[in-house]
Every structure is written in C-alpha cells, then in structure tokens.
Image (cartoon, rainbow, N blue to C red):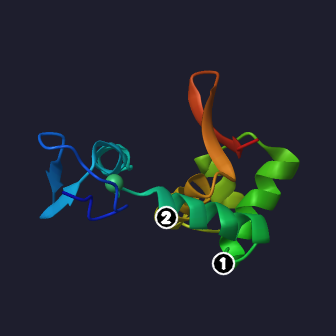
Amino acid sequence: MKCEKCGANIAVGDDRQHAGQILCEDCYMAVMAAPKTCDPWATYSAKNTAAQGLELTVDQRKIIDLIKSEGPLRKEQICSALGIGEDAFQSDFATLRHLELARACKVDDQVHYTLFG
Ligand SMILES: [Zn+2]
C-alpha cells in the first residue's frame, strides 16, 4: 500500500484515510495539523494594505492625523474637529482598528481613541 500524497510505503494497519485518500502517518498528521481556514489571509492583506498606506479614505487619514497630533481624544472631540457624524466615525474607526493603525483606550474612565503603536 502506498501513500497517495508522498508515495511512501505504508505498512498494513498504518494507513490513514482522509478525504477519500489513503495517507501515511506523516501526511495524515500534516493534513490534520494544517490551520483551519478561518481568517489569516484577510488579516495579512489588511496589514499589507496598511503598510503601503493605501485604501484609507480621506476621513480615515484625517482621523489618524488628528489623533497623532492631539490624541488620545474622545469620539465627540474627533467628530466635531473633523465635522463627521458618529456613525461615520464608528465605521472609519473599525477599519483603522482592523488595520492596526488606531485603537481605543480609557482615560479618566472614558473611552478615547489613539494610535495603535
Ligand atoms: Zn505520505
């Protein structure tokens, strides 16, 4: 009997089956140890995008510039300084948080927004 993946000879009784293939112990372990496809690529490409400074909207760049020079700031301060609504800020901030450019923190028990680093 041979492993359908690497071609190694498999002793009788040592064969493993996965997705209809007969595999040797090593290949079977490799398949089972492979990370489940959850979301590593999305995070990776988001970081890549951030590193290149691409795809930030004008408002998102303004938020970064503002908290870089004056942060940490509260949501109300950011919204009034930039003239944007709180809903718009929330969705922009979600993007910035996902890109690991900005984060929330607590100052005097109130949520403030600051740079990630
Ligand atoms: Zn194998």
Would you say residue 86 is visible in this rendering? no
Does residue 9 sit above or below 89 in this rendering?
Answer: above
**Mark 1 crowdedness (10 Å alpha carbons): few <14, some 14-19, many ≥20:** few
Amino acid type, callout 1: Glu
Does residue 27 sit above or below 112 in this rendering?
Answer: below
Q: Which dot, 2 or 1, sits closer to the camera?
A: 2
Q: Nearer the viewer, residue 83 or 72?
A: 72
Say what secondary structure mark 2 lies in: helix
The residue that disc 1 covers is 55
- Does any atom of ligand 1 lie closer than 8 Å to the CB of label 2? no
Q: Is residue 69 left or right of residue 37?
A: right
Q: Please provide percent x and percent y for residue 34.
A: 38, 50
Q: Residue at x 59, y 48 (%)?
A: 75
Quarter containing the N terminus:
bottom left
Disc 2 versus disc 1: distance between alpha carbons?
15 Å
Q: Please provide percent x and percent y for residue 35.
A: 38, 49
Amino acid type, callout 2: Ala
Q: Residue at x 49, y 64 (%)?
A: 42
Circle on res. 42: 2
Q: Is residue 16 left or right of residue 93?
A: left
Q: Please provide percent x and percent y for residue 83.
A: 66, 68
For residue 33, which quarter of the picture? Answer: top left
